[in-house]
Image: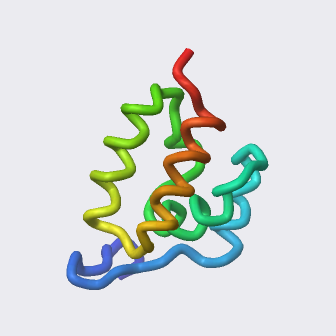
Amino acid sequence: SLTSRPSSSRKVSPSTTQVTCRAARLPPGEGRDATIRVCGQCHDAGIFVNQSAEDWKQTVDEMAKMSDGTDDDFAAITRYLTKAFPAN
């Protein structure tokens, strides 16, 4: 049926168009491409909120356990999110 959901054992990636539209909301900066590529597999750009560097590190470390990305990707993502979405 049209309303059925994919099984949880199958990873479904968003289309390139969906990722591009979501990414347009992210500010430019080093690490943005890694954030789009890795985080965009599951998250919309609207999910990001302002947090401290420590909180971003903890968040990215937790997400890394469930994501496809390299240590370099996750370091770049943490730096990018810390700069693009700093604590208020």
**x%, y% of residue 6?**
31, 79
**x%, y% of residue 79?**
56, 46
Looking at the picture, tell me which residue is in the foreground, 55 or 16.
55
**x%, y% of residue 71?**
42, 67
> How many numbered callouts?
0
Q: In this view, does 17 lie to the left or right of 7?
A: right
Q: Quadrant of the C terminus?
A: top right
Q: Is residue 16 left or right of residue 73?
A: right
**x%, y% of residue 72?**
50, 67
Q: In this view, does 60 lie to the left or right of 80?
A: left
Query: Measured along the vertical axis of the image, is residue 28 above or below residue 35?
Result: above
Query: Measured along the vertical axis of the image, is residue 12 above or below residue 58?
Result: below
Query: Measured along the vertical axis of the image, is residue 62 above or below residue 5?
Result: above
Residue 36 occupies which quadrant of the picture? bottom right
Q: Give the residue drawn at x 54%, y 63%.
A: 40
Q: Give the residue drawn at x 57%, y 27%.
A: 86
Residue 23 occupies which quadrant of the picture? bottom right
Q: Give the residue drawn at x 33%, y 56%.
A: 63
Q: Give the residue drawn at x 63%, y 36%.
A: 83
